[in-house]
Image (tube, rainbow, N blue to C red):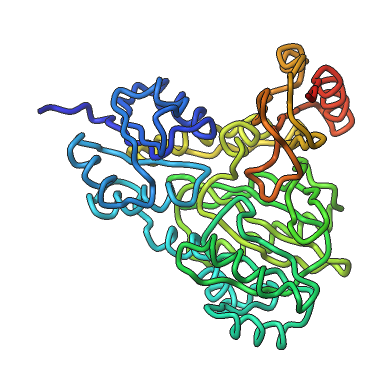
């Protein structure tokens, strides 16, 4: 069988991967797409589809072989990014960097590598038993963060201030850790930041944007807002960008996209929380970064997967943006009104509700439990806030 030289396997076909799939289609790729469920919205753009868990590496490898795949890509998901690099390595396809995927999909390995390279980060201890956790807390002291070493979206993450809550936090983190290992880290108070970046085909890394975040208080911290540009001083911005450049070098990353999280404390120290060798989720790399920088990260990923050259042209961030997560009042939803009008507001780049009539909703337990989100852009933060306010005023959730 003869295959098109642009036979592309895209691992992940949910709404988060739609911009990537659309770009692959625009670039005349024949797409094979995978997802964990048949109702993936991105399947409509693919010539071939398969229901496969991204952690099922043997099945994904066999799918790539049987479809004559010449390139593999993924975005906004750690498991999918790891699978893409694994298949690239096994089949000697372009842009394989399994080492980068290894070190960034396990927070313990990432912490250890950064520690050996003198990166500023919270005190930490990897733990397998409750005794390990208690010993770690004796060394670090309360408050601490207890979290799985290999999950996403705040699953299994708890802040612990009291000895009475230690066992529950450990078991919750363990339940959400695929490797059955957890991290205990010192809690750092300060401004939460993300730094997004990318590599060109020559392996040069570019810092694209810095955002500040709002996060809920309490023992289950959840992000509620991400704002570009970050609400920090120019001096702080320089320090954060220098820190990120050091982290990327320490981890030995070479290809693709980067998404790093930091906390800037009250005396200006920049603490690394974690780095991923993929784009930020919830359309951060697929929509927000291209919108505010003009750098088409979706095209970058497709061309990288196919071994084609690409450049990252100089840019100036001329737009502001906010990713705002909706958390509505608790109750049984009877109706949702004004969605079309809210989405039509000028400056609303994306609006998505994750609830429907009949759902019983309450405070989210993790990032996946938030009730929806909107992406708003404008010339500055004031105009972005105005777009958000107008959108939100048209959106009405009614309860039974």
Q: Residue 119 appears at what percent x and percent y? A: 64, 73
Q: Quadrant of the C terminus?
A: top right
Residue drawn where x is 28% and y is 30% of the image? 6
Asked if 22 appears above or below 240 in the picture, the reply is: above
Residue drawn where x is 45% and y is 56% of the image? 254
Q: Quadrant of residue 36?
A: top left
Q: Is residue 350 visible?
A: no
Q: Residue 98 appears at what percent x and percent y? A: 37, 59
Q: Nearer the viewer, residue 125 or 362?
A: 362
Find the residue positioned furthest to the left: 1
Residue drawn where x is 51% and y is 53% of the image? 277
Q: Is residue 232 left or right of residue 157?
A: right
Q: Nearer the viewer, residue 206 or 135?
A: 135
Q: Quadrant of the N terminus?
A: top left
Q: Residue 201 appears at what percent x and percent y? A: 43, 45
Residue drawn where x is 89% and y is 31% of the image? 382
Q: Is residue 306 left or right of residue 392?
A: left
Q: Residue 384 appears at what percent x and percent y? A: 83, 29
Q: Nearer the viewer, residue 214 or 331?
A: 331
Q: Is residue 346 visible?
A: yes
Q: Nearer the viewer, residue 385 or 326?
A: 326
């Amino acid at each position: 069988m003869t295959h098109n030289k642009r036979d592309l396997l895209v691992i992940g076909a949910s709404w988060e991967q739609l911009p990537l799939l659309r770009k692959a289609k625009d670039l005349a790729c024949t797409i094979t797409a995978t997802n964990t469920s048949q109702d993936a919205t991105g399947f409509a753009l693919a010539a071939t589809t398969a229901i496969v868990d991204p952690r099922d590496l043997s099945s994904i490898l066999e799918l790539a072989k049987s479809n004559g795949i010449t390139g593999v890509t993924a975005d906004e998901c750690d498991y999918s990014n790891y699978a893409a690099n694994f298949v690239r390595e096994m089949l000697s396809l372009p842009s394989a960097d399994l080492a980068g995927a290894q070190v960034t999909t396990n927070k313990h390995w990432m912490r250890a590598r950064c520690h050996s390279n003198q990166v500023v980060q919270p005190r930490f201890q990897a733990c397998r038993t409750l005794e390990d956790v208690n010993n770690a807390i004796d060394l670090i002291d309360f408050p601490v963060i207890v979290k799985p070493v290999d999950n996403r979206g705040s699953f299994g993450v708890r802040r612990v201030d009291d000895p009475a809550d230690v066992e529950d936090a450990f078991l919750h983190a363990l339940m959400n850790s695929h490797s059955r290992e957890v991290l205990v880290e010192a809690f750092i108070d300060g401004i939460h930041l993300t730094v997004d970046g990318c590599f060109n085909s020559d392996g040069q890394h570019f810092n694209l944007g810095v955002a500040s975040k709002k996060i809920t208080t309490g023992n289950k911290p959840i992000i509620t807002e991400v704002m570009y540009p970050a609400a920090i001083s120019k001096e702080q911005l320089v320090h954060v960008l220098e820190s990120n450049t050091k982290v990327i070098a320490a981890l030995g990353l070479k290809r693709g996209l980067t998404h790093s999280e930091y906390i800037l404390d009250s005396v200006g120290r920049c603490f690394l929380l974690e780095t991923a060798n993929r784009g930020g989720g919830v359309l951060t790399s697929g929509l927000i970064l291209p919108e505010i920088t003009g750098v088409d990260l979706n095209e970058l990923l497709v061309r990288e997967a196919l071994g084609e050259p690409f450049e990252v042209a100089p840019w100036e961030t001329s737009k502001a943006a906010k990713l705002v997560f909706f958390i509505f009042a608790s109750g049984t939803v009877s109706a949702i009104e004004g969605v079309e009008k809210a989405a039509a507001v000028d400056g609303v780049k994306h609006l998505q509700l994750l609830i429907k009539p009949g759902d019983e909703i309450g405070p989210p337990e993790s990032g996946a439990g938030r009730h929806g989100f909107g992406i708003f852009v404008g010339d500055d933060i004031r105009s972005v806030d105005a777009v958000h306010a107008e959108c939100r005023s048209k959106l009405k959730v009614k309860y039974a």
